[in-house]
Amino acid sequence: MPYADKYTPKPITDVFNRDTCIDRRQCRRVVPMKVLLLGLGRTGTSSMRQAMKELGYVDTYHMMSASIENPPDCLLWRDAFAAKYDGEGTFGRREWDQLLGHCQAVCDWPAACFAKELIEAYPEAKVILTTRNVDSWHASTMRTGYWRATEPELRFLSYFDWAAAMYYPLIRRLFSNYFEDDFPNRGKQIFIRHYEEIRSIIPPERLLEFKVNEGWGPLCDFLKEPCPSRPFPHVNDTDIFVSRSRKRNRNQMYNVAIRWCIRALIVSVGIWALISVLRFSFAST
């Protein structure tokens, strides 16, 4: 796998973020995949992730799993894009189990970009399509995911920061490949196409189309789970997304600054030591 093979450990100077550094190439499936939530990002996927947790499902994979939790996952996702769009290598059940083997459900993008592949890999899983009005979805994505993919600050950090160097190319690739490098003009059409394609390949008994404002009822009926007494979660609105992203940028800048300060200190000590040795040598002659 050309990108996953570029895995490098997390620098010890990355102290301002709590990223993990798991090399998924060493992982295997440890729990069954039960639910594929294949609605596009910004259709309530963060709320669904929390809802699935409250229903007792062992982790639901989300973009945040790669972007802010375990950045090396981005490398495997880039291998999946390379296999699908460039014909480079293969990405089948074995690779999906490496990447998603710790999860009983998956949602959000980039997973939604591989709906057909995941349905083929996990034919026993139920499928949920989170959805919303296409116009409000497009406006929300323009202010969040697309903003992140075109953000100059993140692009700058990708040249210096360990995590940003893995995440930025992934989100750029997502919008370039899946949205045909023209999300502002093509996004709505591709949204409609995405949902039509999934409806055409999934039997009705395996498919639930769901809006998060419908609450627990339809979801729990479909999954055959008891309804929790607490309200259905609603998280990750536009303001939270932007605030979290900007805070992460700041923390990554601090990590880079620490790394460069340590390097400068090492160079300074080395120069000082060299000067001391030369002075001692001259004094001895």
Image (tube, rainbow, N blue to C red):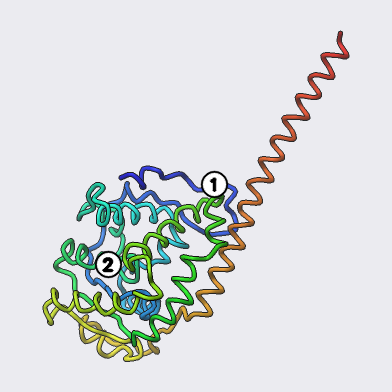
Residues 170 and 211: in front is: 170
Look at mark 2 in the image and give the residue it sits on. Answer: 104
Give coordinates of residue 256: x percent, y percent.
61, 51
Q: Is residue 87 above or below residue 249?
A: above
Q: In what element is the residue under mark 2?
A: loop
The kind of residue on which mark 2 rests is: Gln
Tell me the quarter of the image containing the N terminus.
top left
Quick check: 200 left or right of 272? Answer: left
Give coordinates of residue 160: x percent, y percent.
56, 50
> Do residues under tags 2 and 1 come within 8 Å of each other at their CB atoms?
no
Quarter assignment of residue 254:
bottom right
The kind of residue on which mark 1 rests is: Pro
Look at mark 1 in the image and give the residue it sits on. Answer: 11
Say how many tags the image has. Answer: 2
Question: Which residue appears at 30% of the width and 64% of the height?
Answer: 103
Q: Is residue 59 among the parts visible in the rendering?
A: no
Q: In what element is the residue under mark 1?
A: loop
Question: Which residue appears at 40% of the width and 43% of the height?
Answer: 6
Quick check: 86 left or right of 50? Answer: left
Q: Is residue 165 above or below residue 242?
A: above
Quarter assignment of residue 260:
top right
